[in-house]
Amino acid sequence: MSIPRETLDSISEIYHENTKDRERVIPMDFGYAPATGPWHRAFKKYPHRPRLALSVPEPAASPGAEEVMRSRRTLRQFAGEPLTLTEVERLLYFTNGITGAVPLEGGTLPLRASPSAGALYPIEVYLAALSVDGLEQGIYHYEVEGNALEFVRPGSFGEEIFEITHRQEMVREASACLFMTAMFGRTKHKYGERGYRYVLLDAGHLAQNLYLESTALGLGCATIGGFLDDRANRLIGVDGLEESVLYMAVVGRVLSNGGEKV
Ligand SMILES: Cc1cc2nc3c(=O)[nH]c(=O)nc-3n(C[C@H](O)[C@H](O)[C@H](O)COP(=O)(O)O)c2cc1C
C-alpha cells in the first residue's frame, strides 16, 4: 500500500516511500543472492601511488565479543600519543578487509567482516595518518584486495580535519582519522535507487566493526556524522558524486584515567 503523495513533505519521506520494495516492481529473479559479474570484484586501486603491504592479523588474545560489545563507548578525549602500525593494520583489516571467501561459478567471492547487500561492498576506507609510528603523515587509501595502504598524498591534515568536522575538539588529539566513502554505483547497478539505503546500512556495519576493534585493542574511537561534505571529499580526492564521504571516525590512545564517556 502506497502512502498518498500529498502527505509526503520532506525529501527523506519521498525517498523512503519511493524506494520501498513492492512485489509489483521487483521481478521474481531480482533476488538477494550474491551478485555475479564484474561488479562484486570492483576493488578501487591507486596503481601509481607508493604502496605499503599490510599483514593479515593473527587472532589476538583480546577480550571476548560480548565483553567488547558491552564496553564499547564513544571516546572523545585522547592522549595524543602515536598508534603503532600494527594497530592501524588491525583496525583497517577488521573494518574492511577480506576475511574469507565462498566458491562462486568461475572463481570465488571474497567476503568481509561486515555484511554487505548483494556482497557488493560499496564502501571504501581512507586513512589520514596524523600520528602513526612508521607512517608518514598524509592520506592513504586502504586497498582491500591486496590488504595494503596506498599513499594518496602527504601532508599534516589535523587542522583541516578539525575544521571539516565543525571544530570537534577530539580531532585535535586523535592519532588517526578514517573516512568511509561510498561508491554508490556498485550497489545501485543491482538495486536501483533502493540501493542507496543499502549503502548507508553497509557503512554503519563497517563503523561498528571499527568501534569494536578499537575497543578490543584498548583504543578510543568516535564516529563522526557532522562534517563538511565538500571539504572532506576534496581532502581525500573523491568527486562527491560517484564516490562521496559518508562517515568519518577518529581513533586515538586512551587517557590514563580512561577519559570521559559521555
Ligand atoms: C551516525 C552517527 C553520527 C555521529 N556523529 C558524531 C559526531 O559528529 N560527533 C560526536 O562526538 N559523536 C558522534 N557520534 C557518536 C554518538 O554521539 C554516540 O554513539 C552516542 O552518544 C552514544 O554513545 P556511545 O557511542 O558511547 O554508546 C555519532 C554516532 C552515529 C551513529
Image (cartoon, rainbow, N blue to C red):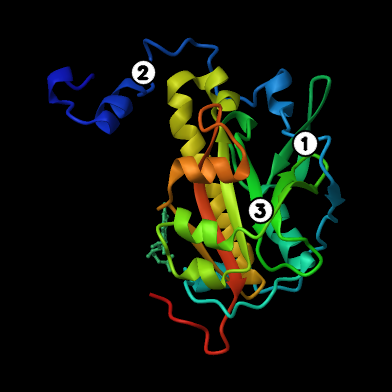
Q: Position of residue 99 (x, y in %)?
A: 75, 47
What is the secondary structure assignment of the residue under circle 2? Answer: loop
Q: Nearer the viewer, residue 144 or 215?
A: 144
> What is the distance, in whole Å, between disc 1 and disc 3 at their CAs?
14 Å
> What's the residue at 78%, 65% (across, down)?
85
> What's the residue at 54%, 48% (across, down)?
205
Q: Is residue 95 visible?
A: no
Residue 22 got which mark? 2
Tag 3: Cα neighbours inside 10 Å, few (<14), some, or many (≥20)? Answer: many
What is the secondary structure assignment of the residue under circle 1? Answer: loop
Residue 46 got which mark? 1
Q: Position of residue 216 (x, y in %)?
A: 64, 70
Q: Which residue is mark 3?
A: 127
- Establish if 247 lies above or below 48: below
Residue type at mark 2 is: Arg
Residue 255 occupies quadrant: bottom right
- Quarter of the image with the C terminus is bottom left
Comparing marks 2 and 1, which lies closer to the viewer? 1
